[in-house]
Image (cartoon, rainbow, N blue to C red):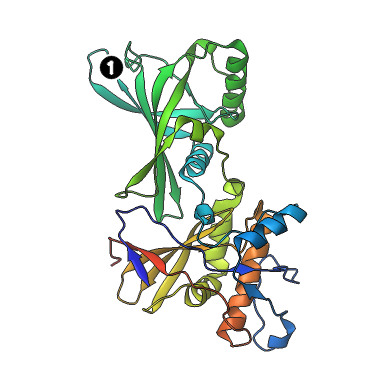
Amino acid sequence: MQLQSQAGVSSHSPMFSLVSLRPSIQSQFFFPNQRHPLRHRSLNCSISATAATAATAAVSSEPATVVLGSPQHKPFPAEVSRTIVELSSVATLSTVTQQGCPLGVSVRFAVDDEDGTPVLCLADSLGIISHDRRSSLNIRLEQSGMRTSQCTIQGSLEKPEDAGRLKRLLSSWRKRFGEEVKEDLVYIVEVERVLQMEDFMEDGMWVSSSDYKNALPDPLRNSAEEFVKEINAKNMEDVNRFCNVYVDLDFQVSEAKMIWIDRLGFDVRLTSTEKDSFDVRIPFPREVTDEKGAKSSFNGMSQLAWEVEKNYQAPAFEKVKQLKQISLRRL
């Protein structure tokens, strides 16, 4: 097992590729029937090779299997930033006042669907807007009460000049807040670069303006929070089993909770019997594109983990070996 400090940028390696993950169940999530082990369909497990993935992608319209050793098991910082912006509506706007002092205020914002540009409605009674248009917008997204992902957009505070764009921005504001705003109050933050951080007290990664604008928010973003809540409420046994089966651990886990889920996998917070906390990334067998696909993958992984735990299936996959230790200890 390899540990990473919280201050470093984490890089977890995916461990397996499952095939034919299509549980024959009707319930929303899968609960193995321990009294009838032969009722569960045996699932094959194999290591995915780049060539095989390319061949599969050439003849299939389904998303390609995640390749072991690639960074694609986790969304890129640009995607994470776009997701944070899409799921948030309040941020901290920092500008330079007429007196040359920095000033930060909480603001509501909407998003231009085309490129992720933040849209603000500002009445300059506080002197927020000055001739120095340099600004930043810090946006946070709390995830299951265990992590606060954030991105800080650096750029300039500008008025949208194009009439077509202004109309689109007004529509974005109306869609998000259900209200009309005056055109002369609309501003945008022209994105120059973005700092994406996974949590407080962690190093971040800079994202270029072009990467941010070209990225797409995660397709599971609107259902991720409820998905995680349901898993942590009803499938805690499965999450604990995932840690014991899919992760290479040298300590006993007293608690495991899902933090967040995306198209490529999910993050789990582990707590040891010694009260130490760790985060681990467990990737899906292949990319998913919607909530239905995520549930299907979760069910398949649950079935396989149960079979491995009960010795009905050999663990023919490489376990996740890298954990990120969280510096704060639980009381």
User: Vertically, is 268 above or below 215?
Assistant: below
Q: Is residue 138 left or right of residue 303?
A: left
Locate residue 87, reporting x and y percent. Answer: 52, 40
* Quarter the C terminus occupies: bottom left
Can residue 43 be seen from the camera position used here? yes
The residue where tag 1 is placed is 97
Category of crowding for the residue at label 1, using alpha-carbon neighbours closer than 10 angstroms: few (below 14), some (14–19), many (at least 20): some
State the image quarter where residue 41 is shown: bottom right
Locate residue 147, reporting x and y percent. Answer: 40, 53
Locate residue 31, reporting x and y percent. Answer: 64, 75
Residue for point 62% across, 56% down: 287
Total marks drawn?
1
Can residue 60 be seen from the camera position used here? no
Amino acid at dot 1:
Thr
Q: Is residue 120 left or right of residue 264?
A: left
Residue for point 73% across, 68% down: 22
User: Vertically, is 212 above or below 126?
Assistant: below
State the image quarter where residue 175 is shown: top right
Q: Is residue 278 left or right of residue 70?
A: left
